[in-house]
Image: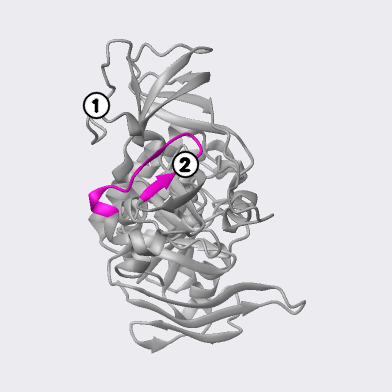
Amino acid sequence: MAVIELEKVRREFPDGTVAVRDIDLRIEDGEFVILVGPSGCGKSTLLRMIIGLEDVTSGTVRIDGEDMTDRQPRDRNLAMVFQDYALYPHLTVRENMEFPLRLAKREQGEINRAVDEAVAMLEIEELLDRKPAQLSGGQRQRVAMGRAMVRQPNAFLLDEPLSNLDAKLRVQMRLEISRLQDRLGVTTVYVTHDQTEAMTLGDRVAVMRKGTIQQIGTPRDLYLRPGNLFVAGFVGSPAMNFFPARVRDGRVELPMLSYDLPAGLRELGDMLEQRDVIAGIRPEHFAWIGAAGARDADVGVDDSDEAVRFRARIDVLEWLGSELYAHFHVTRGDRSGRERTSLHDVADELAEIGVRAPEEQLTVARIDPASEVTEGKEADIWLDTGRVHFFDADTGENLALTRSEPAATG
């Protein structure tokens, strides 16, 4: 097990492209840390810099306090599991797992003990005489994990190890990796673009964007206290809804309604007053109101408070059994009159996961699947005003965190 420290680590390619920008990060002994972000954000490059497969342009990589910046991968005692498994096709499963120990010139008795222990833990005894071409994707992934385990490394580095598997198998392997890390207690750094993997596996999650760590924290902290628009938009599915907003005389003006700033947020009043802000609302913080006034769930408001209620035509319903997503239009209209805000940049990067630009009208709410809301008809919708996030229109920073304490970063 190991403590991994990165100090002002930077990777700049000869053509001037900067893939990783002066990152500071400390990964504790036995900790499971996830690097997550969209394609091209630098997460895999950072992982390869830790293990030594990618040169460090500047900065320092330390493992257990020892400077490893210029050391070869074989000298770092780290094990990497690749996206494509990287198994030798001409070797059997047992031979693949034995290979790193034979390379290290270990004795046969030691090799047998290490392989047998990993095989039993991974439950792949029946696969030992097969070659990779005879294995399913999940079986190949187990073998790749086993080959890493037999080395008894100080840390595991996993680069999108589940991305080649189908959805059902990804869920199964996610659970197996989590249980395995708990049993071994080995420091683990895991790269993924899948936020579900990030939120369910990691002790801490580092959200990356354009070569920098935007925020690092527990999955719960990232979800409830996103440091900026990018983190708020990336974390959560469906993605957070964003609206241009203004606060005047303690009253919040959204495109579909206005309401008094809740008591719990009134300390932000001076900061928000007469300022261009972007309001962020997660889908579950809307609730549908039935004809008899019944509400999906307690959204933290008084039934008599009409200020947090509005009507919208339901365009599309997506029923997923345990969840129901209602899509409806809200005419946003940017009140600032500016051509671009911080949301435009975030929306450009995260459009594929559902973050919408200010000009787009569609909004999504997660409501009770037993609701009687009807597609194509209007419905009354409540808003939990205490759960609305406010972001600076220029910088994208979460103003509530700016007022209290900064979001944790790497």
Q: Which residues are magenta?
A: 251-265
Q: Earlier in the sequence, mark 1 or mark 2?
A: 2
Kind of residue indicated by mark 2: Leu
Residue 261 sits inside the magenta stretch: yes
Decide if residue 35 is on the left or right side of residue 329. left
Residue 395's tag is: none
- Work out whether residue 220 or residue 4 is closer to the camera in this orientation and state it: 220
- Mark 2 Cα within 10 Å, few/some/many (few <14, many 20+)? some
Please tell me how many numbered marks the rendered image carries: 2
Decide if residue 163 is on the left or right side of residue 120. right
Dot 1: what SS? loop
Q: Quadrant of residue 257?
A: top left
Instruction: Name the residue that disc number 2 marks.
Output: 254
Q: Residue at x 38, y 25 (%)?
A: 381
Counting from the top left corner in percent of width and height, residue 142 is at 42, 46
Quadrant where the N terminus sits is bottom left
Counting from the top left corner in percent of width and height, residue 94 is at 44, 51
* For residue 409, above or below residue 37: below
Instruction: Name the residue that disc number 1 marks.
Output: 304
Q: Residue at x 59, y 65 (%)?
A: 210
- Mark 1 Cα within 10 Å, few/some/many (few <14, many 20+)? few
- Work out whether residue 247 or residue 372 is closer to the camera in this orientation and state it: 247
- Work out whether residue 293 or residue 351 is closer to the camera in this orientation and state it: 293
Residue 354 sits inside the magenta stretch: no
Does residue 300 appear in this view? Answer: yes
Q: CA distance from mark 1 to mark 2?
A: 20 Å
